[in-house]
């Protein structure tokens, strides 16, 4: 069954984009260090899981943590949930049809959209 995803533009502590993937009780989250684009790997820093409310939220974040704006929303289905390569089919959005999150041997992670 498809689950929701969102990419938020977040202005704190510096401008970045948060990728959130709905899981059962929370949203798996990565900080993207540049604006999402197609066909180019983007550095993705894993963050602690976020509350599901952030899949629908826009506005000021509590605790003086800036504000967020939803820029891409849709649904996803896992194709592969391997710890080294997570492949996702994306739907219901005008941006991309797939995403792959890869963990490098040095531990860094990158996401690519197509």
Image (cartoon, grey):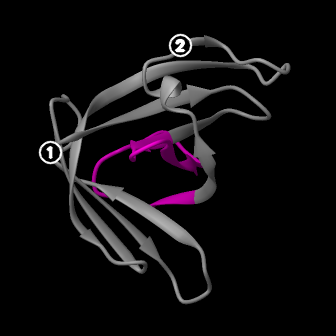
Q: Position of residue 101 (x, y in %)?
A: 39, 65
In magenta, the rendered stretch is: 19-44
The crowd level at tag 2 (other Cα within 10 Å; few <14, some 14-19, many 20+) is some
In three-dimensional space, the C-alpha distance between marks 2 and 1, rounded to whole angstroms, equals 25 Å
Q: For this view, does 21 lie left or right of residue 33?
A: left
Residue 100 horizontal/vertical position (percent): 31, 63
Residue in front for this viewpoint, 76 or 111:
76
Q: Provide residue 93's location: percent of width, then percent of height.
A: 20, 29
Residue underneath mark 2: 58
Residue 19 can be seen in this image: yes
Q: Residue at x 62, y 86 (%)?
A: 106
Outermost residue, front direction?
25
Mark carried by residue 1: 1
Residue 98 in the image: state x and y as whole percent. Answer: 20, 53
Q: In the rendered image, which quarter contains the N terminus?
A: top left
Measuring 53% from the left and 69% from the top, which residue is drawn there?
Answer: 109
**Badge 1 element:** loop
In this rendering, does residue 40 appear at all?
A: no
- Residue 9 is one of the magenta-drawn residues: no
Q: Residue placed at 39% from the left, 46% from the top?
A: 24
Can you say whether 63 is above or below 20 in the image? above
Give the foreground label among 2 and 1: 1
């Amino acid at each position: 069954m498809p689950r929701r995803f969102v990419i938020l533009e977040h202005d704190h502590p510096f401008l970045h984009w948060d990728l959130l993937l709905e899981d059962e009780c929370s949203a798996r989250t990565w900080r993207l260090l540049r604006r999402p684009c197609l066909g180019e790997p983007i550095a993705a820093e894993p963050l602690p899981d976020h509350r599901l409310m952030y899949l629908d939220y826009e506005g000021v974040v509590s605790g003086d943590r800036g504000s967020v704006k939803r820029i891409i929303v849709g649904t996803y289905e896992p194709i592969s949930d391997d710890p080294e390569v997570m492949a996702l089919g994306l739907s219901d959005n005008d941006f991309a049809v797939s995403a792959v999150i890869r963990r490098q041997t040095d531990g860094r992670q990158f996401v690519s959209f197509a």
